[in-house]
Amino acid sequence: RSTLSFSFSENSVTTEVDNGSGPVDNSSCFSATQSTVLKGVYFGGVPIVLLMNFVLLIVFTLIRRRLWDYGRLALIAETEGYRNTRLRSSMSAEEDCETDVCACVCVCSETLVQERCGVDAVHYLSFQKHLVILLLLICVLSVTIILPVNLSGDLLGNDPYSFGRTTIANLKKGDLLLWLHTVFAVLYLMITVALLRRHTSKLKGTKNTLFVRDVPTAASNETIKVHFTEAYPTCQVTDVNLCYDVAKLIDLDRNRIRAEKNLRHYNKILEYQGRREVINPRPCSHLCCCCSQCKGCEGVDAIEYYRSQEAALREEENKQKENKELHPLGMAFVTLQNECMATYILKDFNALKCGGGARGPQPSSKSAELRVNKWKVNYAPHPHNIYWENLSVHGWRWWLRFLLLNTALFFLLFFLTTPSIIISTIDKFNVTKPINYLNSAVISQFFPTLLLWTFSALLPTVVYYSTLGEAHWTRSSENMSMMYKLYTFLIFMVLILPSLGLTSLDVFFRWLFDKQSVRQCVFLPDQGAFFVNYVIAAALVGSAMELLRLPGLLLYIVRLAVAHSAAERKYVKQNQAYEFEYGAMYGWTLCVFTVIMAYSITCPVIVPFGLLYLLLKHLVDKHNLYFAYLPARLDRQVHLGAVNQALAAPIICLMWLYFFSVIRTGFMTATSLFTLVVLCVTIFICISYTCFGHFKYLSPHNYNVSCFVLSEFYPNLQCIVVI
């Protein structure tokens, strides 16, 4: 058996094998510390990176104050229903808080947030608060216990400016203090589970409507209602609604409303100013000074143009409404009197899965006609949660669209795995040879981490538009898909590939066929500094950029540029505010949280900066939810999915510790075996809990006692227990 031992220096790593062979040269390991551009600096460049990112935070904050009107666009948005009330009240709050926004955000109560932003905002901010508490506990333990233990080693020398001395790599092989790291990794896992379970106990939801699919297209409301009344006489059906393909009708209605607003704008100009406006209805016509002189680009009367447009759209919309042959989608919403009745019917349909086909749902005189045995029944989402225009996209068409979009997204992001590809390419062409002699932290740490943050900041936009193209039926499923995809891609881009030293495609294929390179390119002494600097960039630059919301600002500029007239530009301003993207925000936050947890044991210096990131992220998101975004209505499954995703962070921390233990001490040492056993047990429980439902009885949250006195139907029944 060959045992590996490591000898570290600031700019090189030498690997020795105890089987009698000589040292292994790892110069082929194309990592940050082996590039001519990225050369080791004092303390990993952390102080310089911290200072420069703080300066950028100040600069972006000043820019944010100058662009305050853009931040107020959400407050003039014209929306329907409950959102309009929220926005009117927010305008007065904005005026009161304009002089001291930070104080206003900090003292904002949970009740006020729920009134203004919805219950989903409360769940999201509560999740962040629990992560802050978790990192506060881990910060105390890592800085006061793990960091001094790492500094007690002498494997990397006694240079006070060496960042490697703060990492686990500073401890010698066989040091009993390595057991402390393993024990603390298990402790962090238990603390994470305990705090997140406390958070999930607050996620409550009540539903009394069922969503039924695979209903025959010839079925009627009365037929479905008769079936439920006969099959479940103890349950009272209050309403039944069938679904039709209304995608075209929704689009016509949206365009008609827009044309009406534009017409109203120019009618007011005629009424108050006594003049008729002339417009050029070509995109970007107001930006081109010579459009009015071009043939075919003559101006038209604005009132006549939008009046004819509105009349044509109204006529087409009326035809669609009068069309009695709307295409039924084979879906229905069935509303029961209370949640208990809905749960009872849902359990009866789901019992078929556990019965192996031995029994079906309760029969009725309409069961054969409605083909009840083929129904798929679930709780119905909230009406504001549904994309009604996407319900017509289902079956093989939806899956084909899903596979094509995600395949294209995978191949696109495979070649953008990490920004170090650009730096490695520059290094190969040797265009930065003079910089090699500067040995500056700005070149070696600031630019790579800023570039990595920039790529990871662009990734949510790419994932967002690919998810929109999937045509999800609900905002909840859209946000969950966005969260899972974004988290997966970000973890590969930010954590896994840089940790393995896979900074270019040629290194990837070399690593794929040369397993020895794995042991040469991981756990380099300055590797932790790269992730510390990344977290610093995410905390300071990332928070400031989220206040600026540059992607939204760029889209706003483009929409203003392509608007046909002043009325349409006014419409763009009034509809620039968007719903808060919980899926993207969850995925982004969980990625950085996973990076922090993964290196909280091997590189404890990262934890204080991770705590700073979460504190700033919480304040920025609270500000944006309160002032900048429209409230969204989601299901609790989105927030529960984020909790399950967060549990992966301490598991990855265990994986990192296990890999380090195997490389440093071998497979059969006590620390490696103990970490492997804990890791396997944890993964088994998580997979069983998530996929198969085992071990759920261990959670008291799954014993939900709902008491109803149903004296009319069950004289002796006092409560129903739903598990």
Image (cartoon, helix red, strand yellow):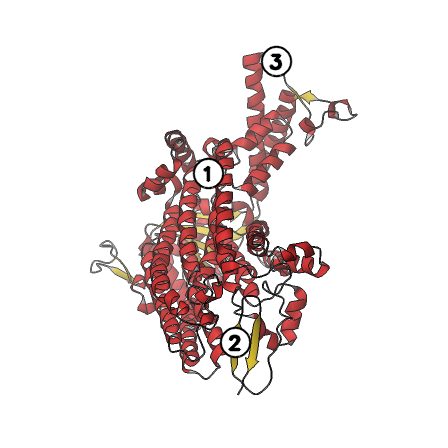
**How far apart, in angstroms, are the residues tagged by discs 1 and 3?**
36 Å
Which residue matches tag 2?
6
Which residue matches tag 1?
628
Disc 1 packing (10 Å; few <14; some 14–19; many ≥20)? many
Q: Quadrant of the C terminus?
A: bottom left
- Please name whichever residue, 108 or 182, is drawn nearer the observer in this view of the structure: 182
Mark 3 element type: loop
Name the mark nearer the viewer: 1 or 2: 2
Query: The residue under label 1 is which amino acid type?
Result: Ala
**Taking 190 as reference, is 430 above or below it?**
above
- Along the polypeptide, which appears first: circle 3 or circle 2? 2
Disc 2 packing (10 Å; few <14; some 14–19; many ≥20)? many
Disc 1 and disc 3 in contact, CB within 8 angstroms? no
Mark 2 element type: strand
Which residue matches tag 3?
275
Residue 697 at x, y percent in the picture: 32, 69
- Along the polypeptide, which appears first: circle 1 or circle 3? 3
- Please name whichever residue, 336 or 679, is drawn nearer the observer in this view of the structure: 679
Residue 700 appears anywhere in the view: yes
| Relative to 355, 218 lies left or right | right
Residue 362 appears anywhere in the view: no
